[in-house]
Amino acid sequence: MTIPATSHASAPAKFILFGEHAVVYGEPALAAPLQSIRAHATISASSAKDPSGLFITADDIYLRCLYGDLMPTHPIAATIRGVLQTIGSSQEPRAHLSLSSAIPVSAGLGSSAATSAAVAQALARFLHRELSANQVSDLVYEVEKLQHGIPSGIDNTVIAHEQTVFFTKTNKTEFLKLTRPLTFLIADSGERSSTKETVAGVRERYKREQKTYQAWFDDIGNITRAARTAVSHGDSELLGKLMLRNQELLEAIGVSCPSLDRLVKAALRAGVSGAKLSGSGAGGHIIAHVHPRQADHVVSRLRAAGARNVFLTELTANTHDS
Ligand code: PMV
């Protein structure tokens, strides 16, 4: 087999529009890719003087070592092993894997899933194979399980398919077609949190007050089902109202925090139709639905309220980059 000199793949960040946490309990969630913020993986053939095996460089996470020296549960090791198993190869190539990512870590934007997805496809391509989006999604899900316990599967699904999804754990994923573009601002609280811990905290409280939490999850499910129509039809007013109701319920289940509350309030005071935290919460990002004309004003209000970084994204009829 001729090995190519280099291969490359990238995968986007993601944001959850509706339904985080409730999705773990069987309710639907709605999420979209953030095409402009991506993780990249490049694999180049080693020269004769390089060490044998697959050498990994990921300067963002201070990682420089051979694949064989990583713990088997390390997400990059687990991804490489998953690809080799999927394509029926017994050994890693003698090559150099270089990783970089613009996605903030532990901030609710799917950084770990995007890195796994980029590594998986770059390695498969280096070995003359192209994984389908479903294969990437399944592989990334297995890696995510090592880190997050039992994830719902929304991160790997939206990141592998790079489309706006209406997702449930058990039903077939729906890819939404939008009739009108929708603009969102995504603002970073600067605080970081562990998805695993936040999800475990909700689980503990759910066990103590099952009836109350179940009712809240049911409400979030109904909001997300209504949002599927609002997103598809570009109904900004309804979308905003649903975001606010979803935020109230996320506050009730205890996953918001003062910095997220402050950003949501600042966005609302600046005139947006809706805002909420996005992802597991307890830090990370909020999203605000804006009219493009409002965006500059809302960005400056969010910055004044402490946002470290604010970026704009537009969901269009076709959010897929090839
Ligand atoms: O990884 P995050 O922070 O975007 O959160 C994932 C969303 C949760 O619903 C909180 C967990 C899950 O597995 O779906």
Image (spheres, grey):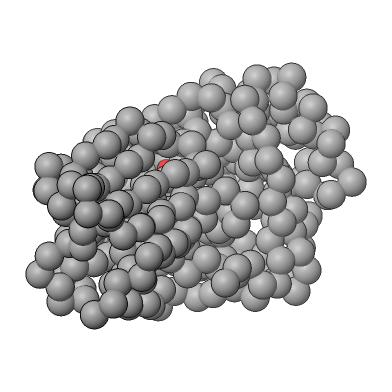
Residue 68 visible in image: yes
Quadrant of the rendered image containing residue 143: bottom left
Q: Is residue 270 left or right of residue 124?
A: right
Residue 88 vertical position relative to residue 162 in the rendered view, above or below: below
Residue 240 visible in image: no
Residue sitting at the far right: 293
Q: Is residue 22 left or right of residue 256?
A: left
Residue at 52% in and 66% down: 162
Residue at 28% in and 45% down: 56
Indicate the position of residue 216 as horizontal and vertical percent values.
44, 47
Q: Is residue 80 left or right of residue 40?
A: left
Indicate the position of residue 43 as horizontal and vertical percent values.
36, 57
Q: Quadrant of the C terminus?
A: bottom right
Q: Quadrant of the N terminus?
A: bottom left
Indicate the position of residue 188 as horizontal and vertical percent values.
58, 32
Q: How many marks?
A: 0
Q: Nearer the viewer, residue 232 or 130?
A: 130
Quadrant of the rendered image containing residue 276: top right
Q: Nearer the viewer, residue 322 or 219?
A: 322
Residue 172 vertical position relative to residue 319 in the rendered view, above or below: below
Quadrant of the rendered image containing residue 136: bottom left
Indicate the position of residue 84 as horizontal and vertical percent values.
19, 68
Residue at 23% in and 47% down: 50
Q: Nearer the viewer, residue 285 or 121?
A: 121
Residue sitting at the far front: 48
Residue at 47% in and 58% down: 11
Q: Nearer the viewer, residue 53 or 204?
A: 53
